[in-house]
Image (cartoon, rainbow, N blue to C red):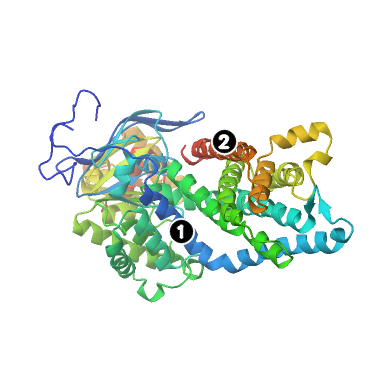
Amino acid sequence: MSTGAAATPAGEPLRRVRRLEPAALAGVMSRDVVIFGRYWKATTFSSVMQPTIYLLAFGLGFGTLVKTIGHIKTVQYIGTGTVATAVLFSSAFPGMFNTFVRWQFQRTYDAMLAAPVDVEELITAEVLWIALRAGVYGLAPLVVAMAFGLQPEAGMLLVPLIGFLTGFGFAAFGVLIAAVAKTIDNFNYVTSAVLTPMFLVAGTFFPVSTLPDGVRTVAQFNPLYHCVQLVRDASLGGLGSADLGHAGVLLGFALLMWRLAIWRLGKRLID
Amino acid sequence: MSVADSDGASPAAGEGAISLRKVVKRFGHIVAVDGLDLEVQSGVCFGLLGPNGAGKSTTMRMLTAQTLADSGEIAVLGYELPRESKQARMEMGVVPQLDNLDVELTCRQILTVFARLYRVPGAQRAAAVEKALELANLKGRADTIVRELSGGMRRRLLVARGLIHRPRLVLLDEPTVGLDPQVRQELWTLIDALRVEGVTVLMSTHYIEEAERLADVVAVMSHGRIVAQDAPARLVKAYAGERVLEVYGPPARLAEASEHAARRGWQSRRSGPALAIMRAETLDGDAPEGVLRPANLEDAFVALTGEEIE
């Protein structure tokens, strides 16, 4: 069928390839919802337990020595800092592992791509779902911290949004890693060499300002640092113009990772 | 497209369902598909028969644009690939060679997810799922997790999944590979029912019997090309004649018969314990002693590809 020569006759239905069709995204996400229905208890348990342990450890142990961190009460500092770690872990890990398992082991992606779903829709839907979940579970540390004396603030209502944006970037980052990984064991390198330093050098448990100059500069390039700042400012009633910059970095990171994930995984899903 | 269709529903009415022209696909140094030309008419059950590595699965994957051709033209249901492949996939169903079911989901959950992916409207989704369960004879297992299903049930579910949106074209990639004879029979019944309904079926297989039993037209594929294409009976007649003479005996006698056949220009091949000489109806007086049997598709296949098959 040649293009050009055979001009579209009048009356022939317009066949335009639409990108990112909501129906395709909903179809892919409906599978995630069904799977989540089986695992929500375990997921919820771990996302409540993790901040509880941090708050207990830092609050009861460290907190008896240090009442404030960078002029902020310890419970407020750790409570808001753990939001960022919760978002990081609930997005980067599913991004890596779910993608690898569904693509390589279960061949779920192969099955879906034989249906009217393209690579862009598939990856976008998967990342979108993880980001939504990260946004919701990002609230868990705040709720736990409230039990430890954190005061509720109107600005906390922005936290799911911040969690969503950060989670989108890290979920797509996880997909990107899965796309370039040779085996699932390769994820260990990323976890220990990228994710762990990232979540420590982000102002989660201690201020970045206490770090040497070089590391402080590196922290500026850490999306999680910007997430922590944004969450802290929103939750402690201190939103200002600098937060637009933080949000901008998170948005840029999300968009960049999203396109890179589609590009790299697309190359491997379609041969 | 040269003709605008009047009802606008079926752009490919009266056309071939699948058309491949000079399609080439390489993986590194390996040429998997080598200038393939293939036309599948609407409403037929078309068998793509070839040994492992002939390029059948690559061809199947190119029809869903999951593998992209290096060169050549591909059209499916009147849509040009890969540009319009998503529209083509809306109207076709795919049953893959490898089981890619979601093992953690139930039959009903899987079918519901795919009903959504295939854009079955919400109001019709439940009915479509029920119908697919019935078709695959899985009504009693609707809420069983895939992990707990037998191999045969999983295969039937794979077929049901590909038919959930009542496609006009169904691609079956080695539908019965690795199945026991009873399950294979069940699947053949399912495929046969599709053909009766007028659905176009493209089936790849390396089982001669499967192609012979189900396909209206068989294309023999070898080294990335079609080497012959016709109705099974006509392929047999054209490439193996009407009857085959099977010569039995110890290896030395078979070797001698083989040499004799070669000297006389008769086409022969080893077939299990025997030497099979094609076109027995044309042999003259000095043919070796043996047993006559009707020629079959396997004879034609081996004559065409030079390869023995399961």
Residue A145: mark = none
Q: Position of residue A123 (x, y in %)?
A: 49, 45
Residue furthest top in the image: A5
The front one of B223 and A8 is A8
Residue wearing tag 1? A31
The front one of B170 and A195 is A195
- Please name the amino acid that badge 1 sits on: Arg
Q: Residue at x 62, y 56 (%)?
A: A138
Choose top left, top right, bottom left or bottom right for residue B158: bottom left
Vertical relation: B202 (above or below) B62: below
Residue A158 vs residue B131: left or right?
Answer: right
| Mark 2 element type | helix
Q: Residue at x 41, y 28 (%)?
A: B70
Q: Position of residue A253 (x, y in %)?
A: 59, 37
Q: Position of residue A72 (x, y in %)?
A: 77, 51
Vertical relation: B36 (above or below) B208: above
The alpha-carbon separation of the residues under discs 2 and 1 comes to: 28 Å
Choose top left, top right, bottom left or bottom right for residue B192: bottom left
Question: Is residue A138 something one can see in this rendering?
Answer: yes
| Mark 1 element type | helix
- Foreground tag (2 vs 1): 2
Few, some or many residues within 10 Å of mark 2 (<14, 14–19, 20+): some
Vertical relation: B80 (above or below) A88: above
Do dots 2 and 1 share one subunit? yes
Q: Position of residue B147 (x, y in %)?
A: 51, 67
- Please name the amino acid that badge 2 sits on: Gly
Rendered-image quadrant of the N terminus of chain A: top left
Residue wearing tag 2? A252
